[in-house]
Amino acid sequence: MTGPSAATGAAHAAALALGDDALVLSHRLGEWAGHAPVLEEEVALANIALDLLGQARVLLGLAGDEDELAYLREERDFRNLQLVEQPNGDFAHTIARQLYFSVYQRLLYERLAAGDGELAALAAKAVKEVAYHQDHAEHWTLRLGDGTPESHERMQRACQTLWRYTGEMFQPVEGLDVDWQALRDTWLSATADVLGRATLTMPTGPQSGAWSAGAGRQGLHTEPFGRMLAEMQHLHRSHPGASW
Amino acid sequence: MSSSTDWPLWEVFVRSRRGLSHTHAGSLHAPDAAMALRNARDLYTRRSEGVSIWVVPSTVITASSPDEKDPFFEPAADKPYRHPTFYEIPEGVKHL
């Protein structure tokens, strides 16, 4: 039986999952501020982080009170992919994470934008931002992969390390009417195309299954996520209701 | 990527809207032209300042020298008849 409340529940779940993806990746990218390899790149990463934060605010606003959701939930209540909570690592890890996620997010938002409702409106606006995020990640993947032996080796390692977090992206999300298998196939060929041009080999090993990760959508997160949340939430929890 | 000093310097020109010419906005470091264009987008157009960007390697710019300031520019100072100030500008002509 699907009444209005069930539909609201599904829309809520979808907004929460996508909103948490954007919020958590935004925070991770923000961690580069003051630490990026060069000033120009620091601004580029901060711009991407701000785009994602804007998306997160709209999405969490659809799911409830944005501040409450961002700052007062416990780790198990977050519905983001484990991929986006992975630590920045070296610059190659940040770029590999961004490439995997941006390609996914662009393909997903293109599909959502074709629908209707509040989510479609957000997706239509966000897909332009995400196209740039993907372009940025692609250009760096090409330069690192097809750069020096050192950069090639580190980019390859980053792609391989994060591979086991990619299967989770294609788990169906409640409230989203998407052909997930087709999304996965398109993602695989798009990613293989970029890695191929960057002279990198497509990672091997399971994307999902017993020996891979991936239950972020169910609220299970990896160890570094707790520390990230503590840092992200500490100010709001120490000074409830503070503003400036 | 040891430091940005390994990367060449680029001059950035931004056209703020159609009909205007590109104006020098600043400079930045980037490993190549494609990345320079992207860095310029992030540094100089993030507040909707532009609709078009040019990037030019700083090394290809030949600049006048401050030492040559007088022979270059001084002689023009006392020739007001070169200024098109004796015409009335027709109504509706902008950016002149």
Image (spheres, coloured by chain):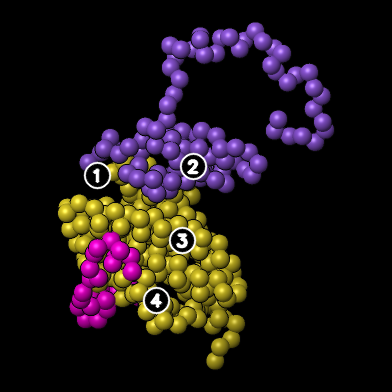
Chain colours: A yellow, B purple
Q: Find out whether the residues at labels 1 and 3 contact each other: C-beta distance under 8 Å.
A: no
Q: Which residues are magenta?
A: A193-222
Residue A222 placement: quadrant: bottom left
Marks 2 and 1 sit apart, C-alpha to C-alpha, by 24 Å
Residue behind mark 1: B1
Q: Which residue is mark 4?
A: A186
Quadrant of the snapshot with the N terminus of chain A = bottom right
Q: Was residue B5 drawn as part of the magenta stretch in this picture?
A: no
**Image quarter for residue B63?**
top left
* Label 2: which secondary element: strand
Residue nearer the viewer, B15 or A132:
B15
Disc 2 packing (10 Å; few <14; some 14–19; many ≥20): some
**Which kind of residue does numbered mark 1 sit on?**
Met
- Residue A217 is one of the magenta-drawn residues: yes
**Disc 3 to disc 2, how far (Cα)?**
21 Å
Q: Is residue A126 above or below residue B38?
A: below
